[in-house]
Image (cartoon, grey):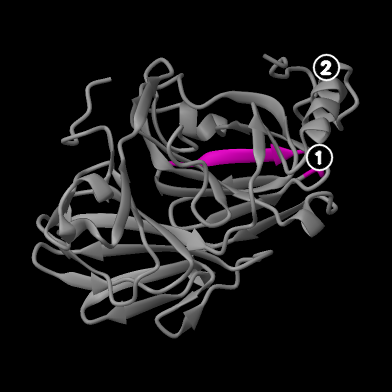
């Protein structure tokens, strides 16, 4: 992939003094999955995590003709909580707890995999029967060590339950954690921040403070400290107070962050603070010891 950034992943220490609040600007790795593109920002060789967040994908936007769509077979996870958030479209979630839930724009699906959980992501026949679009974010939270082996759980939060605030004319949704005087009802296991904001050209937003922060530009472009934040980039900020971003185009941003939970190992869909736990999970999946997904028992994704 050719990068649109001046450098694909540039450390601002090597640039100008204007970058002192910016630790890193990441460009996505883009993968075409057959009519369905994914832009991956985390993990990367230069940045494994931002706070507790260890995985960040933008899905699409993908245009599907009738008869086609998302069709991800059952696969396992350990040690994380997955977060699915859609801008447009719909995904049908099934998991080994028996959950069956359609996620739609503005909703938040939180799947706490803990000691092990299996899920599939497909679409309802009513959706695939006609032309449709899918666009959204998929993120993984590394669970703190004391929660890595917690009992699996699934939580669905309808869009109406996610708080919205007006910050000097900028609409902001507080998806997880607390910011701007509002607190999300979405379950967290450590200090965690996830919010979305829409800025018109010329509008500014002062970012909430937390130990680590990464700002993703899903639409448009912004500036911070005289540094351009291009479309589809993730800017990792130093923990300085009063950092303000200004939209140079109408923009949609996602801000993730929180306190570090310490280093993690990641292999395929497995995340753990212990390498041997990942090896155990690989063997368990290979040998069929994970639970099946009710209503989706026949297919599965083999261990790579």
In screen coordinates, is 241 left or right of 122? left
Q: Nearer the viewer, residue 100 or 264?
A: 264
Expressed as whole percent of the image width and height from the top left, the position of residue 220 reads 18, 49
Q: Is residue 300 above or below residue 146?
A: above
The stretch in magenta equals 89-98
**Sequence-wise, which precedes: disc 2 or disc 1?**
1
For the residues labelled 2 and 1, the Cα–Cα distance comes to 14 Å
Magenta region includes residue 231:
no
Q: On the image, numbered disc 1 is attached to which residue?
A: 116
Q: Which residue in the protein does label 2 denote?
A: 286
Visible residue check, residue 61: yes
Q: Is residue 130 above or below residue 140?
A: above
x, y percent for residue 187: 66, 66
Query: Which class describes the residues within 10 Å of circle 2: few (<14), some (14-19), or many (20+)?
Result: few
162 up-or-down from 148: above or below = below
All told, the count of numbered labels is: 2
Element type where label 1 sits in the image: loop
Tell me, yes or no, whether the two marked residues, 2 and 1, touch with CB atoms within 8 Å: no
- In the picture, residue 98 is in which quadrant? top right
Quadrant showing the C terminus:
top right
Q: Which mark is residue 88?
A: none
Nearest to the observer: residue 279 or residue 189: 279
């Amino acid at each position: 992939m050719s990068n649109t950034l001046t450098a694909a992943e540039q450390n601002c220490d090597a640039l100008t003094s204007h970058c002192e609040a910016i630790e890193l600007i990441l460009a996505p790795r883009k993968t075409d999955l057959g009519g369905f593109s994914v832009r991956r920002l985390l993990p990367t060789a230069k940045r494994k995590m931002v706070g507790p967040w260890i995985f960040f994908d933008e899905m699409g936007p993908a245009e599907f003709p009738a008869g086609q769509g998302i069709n991800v077979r059952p696969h396992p996870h350990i040690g994380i909580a997955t977060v699915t958030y859609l801008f447009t479209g719909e995904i049908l979630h099934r998991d080994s707890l028996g959950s069956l839930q359609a996620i739609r724009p503005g909703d938040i699906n939180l799947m706490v995999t803990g000691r092990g959980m299996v899920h599939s992501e497909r679409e309802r026949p009513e959706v695939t029967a006609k032309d449709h679009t899918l666009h959204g974010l998929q993120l993984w939270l590394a669970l703190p060590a004391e929660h890595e082996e917690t009992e699996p759980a699934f939580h669905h939060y309808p869009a109406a339950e996610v708080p919205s605030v007006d910050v000097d004319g900028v609409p902001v949704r507080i998806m997880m954690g607390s910011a701007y005087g509002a607190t999300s009802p979405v379950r967290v296991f450590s200090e965690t921040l996830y919010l979305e904001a829409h800025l018109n050209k010329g509008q500014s937003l002062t970012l909430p403070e937390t130990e680590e922060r990464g700002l993703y530009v899903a639409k448009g472009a912004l500036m911070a400290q005289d540094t351009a934040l291009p479309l589809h980039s993730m800017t990792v900020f130093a923990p300085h107070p009063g950092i303000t971003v200004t939209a140079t185009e109408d923009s949609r941003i996602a801000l993730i962050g929180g306190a570090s939970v310490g280093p993690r190992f990641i292999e395929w869909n497995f995340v753990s603070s212990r390498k041997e736990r990942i090896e155990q999970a690989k063997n368990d999946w290979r040998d069929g010891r994970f639970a099946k997904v009710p209503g989706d028992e026949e297919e599965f994704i083999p261990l790579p």
